[in-house]
Amino acid sequence: MTFDALGNVNNLCSQQPVFGCYDPSLFGTLGTAKRTICCGPHISQTDFAILKTIPLSETKHLDFRAEFFNLFNHTQFFTPDGNTSDGSQFGQVTQARDPRLMQFALKFFF
Protein backbone atom coordinates (compact mmCIF):
# COMPACT_ATOMS: atom_id res chain seq x y z
CA MET A 1 0.00 0.00 0.00
CA THR A 2 1.36 3.43 -0.92
CA PHE A 3 0.13 7.00 -0.90
CA ASP A 4 0.21 9.31 -3.89
CA ALA A 5 0.99 13.03 -3.78
CA LEU A 6 -2.63 13.85 -2.87
CA GLY A 7 -2.74 11.37 0.03
CA ASN A 8 -4.86 8.76 -1.81
CA VAL A 9 -4.16 5.11 -1.04
CA ASN A 10 -2.78 2.92 -3.85
CA ASN A 11 -2.53 -0.87 -3.55
CA LEU A 12 0.05 -1.17 -6.32
CA CYS A 13 2.24 -3.61 -4.42
CA SER A 14 -0.34 -6.39 -4.53
CA GLN A 15 -1.10 -5.84 -8.23
CA GLN A 16 2.34 -5.46 -9.80
CA PRO A 17 6.00 -6.36 -9.27
CA VAL A 18 7.92 -4.63 -6.49
CA PHE A 19 8.90 -1.67 -8.69
CA GLY A 20 5.23 -0.83 -9.14
CA CYS A 21 5.05 0.12 -5.44
CA TYR A 22 6.73 3.47 -6.09
CA ASP A 23 4.70 6.46 -7.13
CA PRO A 24 6.73 8.32 -9.79
CA SER A 25 4.88 11.57 -9.04
CA LEU A 26 6.64 11.70 -5.65
CA PHE A 27 10.20 11.54 -7.05
CA GLY A 28 12.11 14.71 -6.30
CA THR A 29 9.88 15.72 -3.39
CA LEU A 30 10.90 15.80 0.26
CA GLY A 31 9.49 13.04 2.43
CA THR A 32 8.71 12.90 6.13
CA ALA A 33 11.99 11.33 7.29
CA LYS A 34 14.19 13.35 9.62
CA ARG A 35 17.01 15.16 7.85
CA THR A 36 19.65 13.82 10.22
CA ILE A 37 18.95 10.09 10.05
CA CYS A 38 22.50 9.35 8.89
CA CYS A 39 24.26 7.28 11.49
CA GLY A 40 27.85 8.13 12.30
CA PRO A 41 30.61 5.80 13.39
CA HIS A 42 30.46 4.20 16.82
CA ILE A 43 32.05 5.80 19.86
CA SER A 44 34.81 3.84 21.56
CA GLN A 45 36.00 5.87 24.52
CA THR A 46 37.68 4.50 27.65
CA ASP A 47 38.13 6.75 30.68
CA PHE A 48 40.44 5.86 33.58
CA ALA A 49 41.13 7.40 36.99
CA ILE A 50 43.51 6.48 39.80
CA LEU A 51 43.69 7.83 43.35
CA LYS A 52 46.55 7.59 45.85
CA THR A 53 46.14 8.74 49.47
CA ILE A 54 49.42 9.68 51.17
CA PRO A 55 49.22 9.97 54.99
CA LEU A 56 51.32 12.82 56.44
CA SER A 57 50.24 12.64 60.09
CA GLU A 58 47.27 11.43 62.11
CA THR A 59 44.98 14.19 60.90
CA LYS A 60 46.63 15.28 57.66
CA HIS A 61 46.93 13.53 54.32
CA LEU A 62 47.36 14.24 50.61
CA ASP A 63 45.22 12.83 47.80
CA PHE A 64 46.79 12.54 44.38
CA ARG A 65 44.37 11.86 41.53
CA ALA A 66 45.13 11.25 37.87
CA GLU A 67 42.32 11.08 35.29
CA PHE A 68 42.59 10.07 31.65
CA PHE A 69 39.77 10.66 29.17
CA ASN A 70 39.82 8.70 25.89
CA LEU A 71 42.72 6.68 27.28
CA PHE A 72 43.48 4.77 24.06
CA ASN A 73 43.15 7.93 21.94
CA HIS A 74 40.57 6.52 19.51
CA THR A 75 39.38 9.08 16.99
CA GLN A 76 35.75 9.97 17.72
CA PHE A 77 34.03 11.41 14.65
CA PHE A 78 30.72 13.28 14.75
CA THR A 79 27.84 12.16 12.53
CA PRO A 80 27.84 13.15 8.86
CA ASP A 81 26.40 16.54 7.96
CA GLY A 82 22.67 16.09 7.33
CA ASN A 83 21.94 19.67 6.30
CA THR A 84 20.99 19.71 2.62
CA SER A 85 21.14 23.49 2.36
CA ASP A 86 24.89 23.92 2.91
CA GLY A 87 25.89 22.42 -0.43
CA SER A 88 29.16 20.54 -0.73
CA GLN A 89 29.44 19.42 2.92
CA PHE A 90 26.25 17.33 2.88
CA GLY A 91 26.97 13.77 4.00
CA GLN A 92 30.57 14.52 5.04
CA VAL A 93 32.13 14.23 8.48
CA THR A 94 33.80 17.56 9.25
CA GLN A 95 34.42 17.39 13.03
CA ALA A 96 35.88 15.08 15.64
CA ARG A 97 35.54 14.90 19.42
CA ASP A 98 38.36 15.68 21.86
CA PRO A 99 41.57 13.62 21.72
CA ARG A 100 43.14 12.06 24.81
CA LEU A 101 42.91 14.41 27.77
CA MET A 102 44.71 14.03 31.10
CA GLN A 103 44.27 15.93 34.34
CA PHE A 104 46.05 15.68 37.66
CA ALA A 105 44.92 16.90 41.08
CA LEU A 106 46.58 17.20 44.46
CA LYS A 107 44.34 17.78 47.48
CA PHE A 108 45.59 18.49 51.01
CA PHE A 109 43.33 17.49 53.92
CA PHE A 110 43.91 19.04 57.34
Image (tube, rainbow, N blue to C red):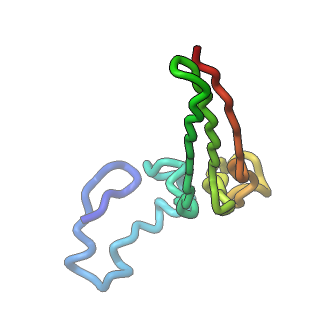
Q: 8 or 69, which lies in front?
A: 69
Q: Quadrant of residue 18?
A: bottom left
Point out the residue furthest to the top here. 110
Q: Position of residue 20 (x, y in %)?
A: 35, 78
**Placement of 95 over or under 56, stated as above or below:** below
Q: Residue at x 52, y 63 (%)?
A: 27
**Placement of 25 over or under 87, stated as above or below:** below
**Placement of 83 over or under 12, stated as above or below:** above
Q: Position of residue 9 (x, y in %)?
A: 25, 57
Point out the residue furthest to the right here. 88
Q: Position of residue 25 (x, y in %)?
A: 47, 62
Q: How many marks?
A: 0
Asked whether, in this view, residue 77 is left or right of residue 48, the answer is right
Q: Residue at x 53, y 54 (%)?
A: 29
Q: Residue at x 46, y 68 (%)?
A: 24
Point out the residue furthest to the front here. 57
Q: Position of residue 97 (x, y in %)?
A: 68, 49
Q: In which quadrant will I find the C terminus? A: top right
Q: In which quadrant will I find the N terminus? A: bottom left
Q: Residue at x 32, y 49 (%)?
A: 7
Q: 84 or 108, which lies in front?
A: 108
